[in-house]
Image: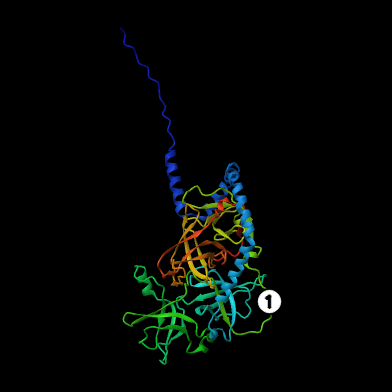
Amino acid sequence: MAQEESVSFPVRTVKQPRYSTLWLFAWLGLCFLAMRPVPSVDALFGQLAAPGRWMAELASPLGVLRAPRAIARERELARNASEELEENLELLADLRRFAEPSEARLREGRRLVAAEVIGREEGHRDRLVVRLNDARGVEEGLPVALGNDYVGRVVEVHPEDTDGRSEAIVELVTARGFHVGAQVQPGPGEEPIYLSVGGIDVEPNERGAQGTDRQIRLAVHNPSDRELVAGMARVFELFPDAQSNADLAQGLRLGEIRAEEAGERWSVLPELDYLDGLFQVVILCPPMDLPARRPVPPILMDQAWLKTSLLVGGDPSPWRETAKIRAGSSHGIRRGAAVTALGARLVGRVLRTSPWSSDVSFLGDRGFHVAALARIEGEEQPQVLGRLVSLGREDDGSLSFRWTPRVDLVLSDRAGEGRRRARFFTGSGDAGLASGFFLGEGWMPVEARRDEPQILVIESELDPRDLRTLFVRTSGVSVSR
């Protein structure tokens, strides 16, 4: 039997493209951009994804499902809008009033010019940008105060705009190289001790990084007597002619003297939170006879607010509370701009912008932070808190914030509960955000020591993702913090 011959056919091998390698590089690139965003690339992807977002919104049923709840919420906000506006104006008036010195000798022979802190000068943490509604008579070298305490001095004044507002730059006493004369009265009948104060005392604050002493101190220079132990340091220039308008600052408080290293080092413990607690200050000017000027409307009532709405329902991440709005850089929106509901309620701030939309971080977004103050029940003066950092929204809708006071707070415990009822509002000092926007109600501890973290729970019945109408600030956000 003949052996059967096998027949073989030629086989051509097709080389497959290495898509897996391309996907790997693409994935690595996206991970890098997520951790280190490049603004130009981020803006490009935002423009490319914009049509998809609009289509997703049209196809989403969330808007329909949320509509009845949104209508009910906005009707309630509209009913309370006028009351919240009145409360806002009253709070701003009190901030201006309590920013003025209360001691008669610090008011005599001085014209007090109110100035709202709106941010920090670009690249200079120790320089405030302040807004003046009346800049007449304000010039370089004039001292700046908050209550009876010394803040710094004016180093630059900008021309007025068409609304009559002006801006000025204030250098803080914490700035490196800053010096102001001071004196300490050790006791009744004793000779005063003269010294110079200015800048941050580096050594105690470096030890603070190790957890032993985190209190910010001002540096002391050249005391006239090495027996300096304690006492209140007040501004006092031995040679007032050497500094123009130095006499206007005489007597302002700087803080308590702290002696260290067996009397070989001294520092000043200030009574102000120079980092996050300066919302409203006053400039001390020479007296001038000036005609009255038409008052400038408050920020809440000017024309720089844009009505907008949510573009999509929110961030899909369960631990984030963010969303996109229908306004972007082409509408004048900048990073940090305030986002409010009807009335005078802050609901969030702009995180980033693209030409036609913006990402907004709401109060319940973990890591959201805001300078704040409190109206404490039974207290006439608003209480400056400083920086609040959001820990997220609780199941009952309330908001938890971490608060680390930089100045001691001690209140009377009238009910013996260890806490007092309070209403919380924004402070200024962050670019794009003014003082007086309502945050919510809650409880304040009657005692809080500086640098000891506290948890504040602010009650909130409002979820901004349920609203149809929002307002976003379109100007006054150019200052970097």
Residue 459 placement (x, y as % from top left): 51, 58
Residue 370 placement (x, y as % from top left): 51, 63
**For the residue labelled by badge 1, is the local secondary structure a helix, a strand or a loop?**
loop
Residue for badge 1: 293
The answer to whether 84 is drawn above or below residue 55 in the figure is below
Q: Say which quarter of the image contains residue 95.
A: bottom right
The answer to whether 467 is drawn above or below residue 91 in the figure is above
**Could you tell me if residue 8 is visible in this image?**
yes
Residue 418 placement (x, y as % from top left): 43, 67
At 40% from the left and 87% from the top, the residue drawn is 186
- Say what amino acid the circle numbered 1 marks: Arg
Q: Nearer the viewer, residue 359 or 461?
A: 461
Would you call the spot at circle 1 few (<14 residues within 10 Å), some (14-19), or many (20 or more)?
Answer: few
Residue 156 placement (x, y as % from top left): 56, 76
Q: Nearer the viewer, residue 2 or 141?
A: 141
Q: Nearer the viewer, residue 250 or 451?
A: 451
Count of residue discs:
1
Give the side of residue 475 with respect to residue 179, left or right: right
Give the side of residue 474 with respect to residue 261, left or right: right
Colour scheme:
rainbow
**Could you tell me if residue 407 is visible in this image?**
no
Task: Spot the residue most to the top.
Answer: 1
Q: Which corner quadrant holds the N terminus? A: top left
Q: Say which quarter of the image contains residue 221.
A: bottom left
